[in-house]
Amino acid sequence: PGRITMKPTLEQKALIRACQAGTVLLIEDGLMEVKVTEKVSDAELKVQITRGGKLKARKGVNVPDCEIDCAALTAKDIEDAEYLLALDPPCEYICVSFAAQKGQDLQELIDIMDRMRIPAEKRPKICPKIEKPQAFTNIEGIIEKSQALMVARGDLGVELGVYRVPFAQKLLITRAKQAGLFVITATQMVESMIENPVPTRAEVSDLANAVWDGTDAVMLSGEAASGKYPLEAVMAEASAVREAESVKHRLRRACPPVENALVVPPRLHVDMGNKKLETNDALRKTKVVASLGPASWSEEMIPKMILAGTDIFRLNC
């Protein structure tokens, strides 16, 4: 019992405009669900909680049943893009969330680079995050204006349906590789390591399958940004993808003899007492992307993250 009053925080007002009574909204990758009972105005909705949880700041809101007519880049996105493009040296990639139209979403970013007269050799690679079903219909137009592509499985699972994600992942990686794009597979790669020091067997299998699908990179989100074991998460990903790469060529052949089937790599370990990390990543091709956050954003942690196996850092503006 009681009353909860919240200040509206959704930047995309088009999301609210697209909703009607009966519309279902999913929060935090579908962990929570609410149903619109009344559309008070184009800026306010009344909802009924159908699947509850702890509501936190900066969590995504999805409306799978609606096609939302809104700009891919908000005013804050444009401000952040201009800041990143002015850096010297520049960042290597700029990701565009919910890119779904035939390249129009990405053209906005290209126009900003043109306006700022960023030379071709200094332009970051444009990396659309594929998160909406409409992106599959428009994938050729999206690829045409991109140099990289992210399979963003969190929102994609909410929008498309979680059981369709494995096929969508394989389809996107295959098409992107055919077009010569750098591909990042993201979301819940080793989610359990937010709380635990070792990955589950299912997570290691997921990483291996992403490598065998052809991904160029696997990305850590909350595991590196806010988890209890960011270094161990990086090392787990690096170890899993290296092992997957070492046997990839055997998948096209008959099963090898048992005594030759496994090559045990040198053990990775972290000696936090001496602040020393040891890895053996010389032969690894698949990149490890780590999202920066409270658990990893410090002068002390970043060098350790690099030594643990991080190849690319992701900053969520």
Image (spheres, rainbow, N blue to C red):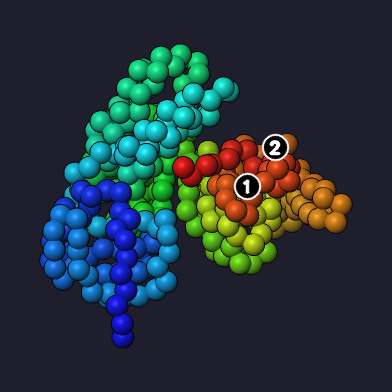
Q: Give the numbered dot on residue 134.
A: none
**Residue occupying image coordinates x 58% and y 23%:** 89
Q: Name the residue under label 2.
A: 283
Confirm whether residue 240 shows in the render: no
Q: Name the residue under label 1.
A: 297
Residue 96 in the image: x percent, y percent?
38, 38
Residue in front for this viewpoint, 115 or 256:
115
- In the visual, does 158 lie left or right of 95? left
**Residue 39 lies in quadrant:** bottom left
- x and y percentages locating residue 26 in the rendered image: 30, 63
Residue 226 appears in the picture as rendered:
yes
Q: Is residue 85 above or below residue 258?
A: above
- Decide which of 196, 40 is in the foreground and name it: 40
Query: Do residues under tags 2 and 1 come within 8 Å of each other at their CB atoms?
Result: no
Amino acid of disc 1: Trp
Query: At 82% from the left edge and 50% from the top edge, which residue is drawn?
Result: 275
> In what element is the residue under mark 2?
loop
Left or right of 270 on screen, residue 208? left
Q: Position of residue 145 (x, y in %)?
A: 34, 26
Q: Residue at x 44, y 16 (%)?
A: 118
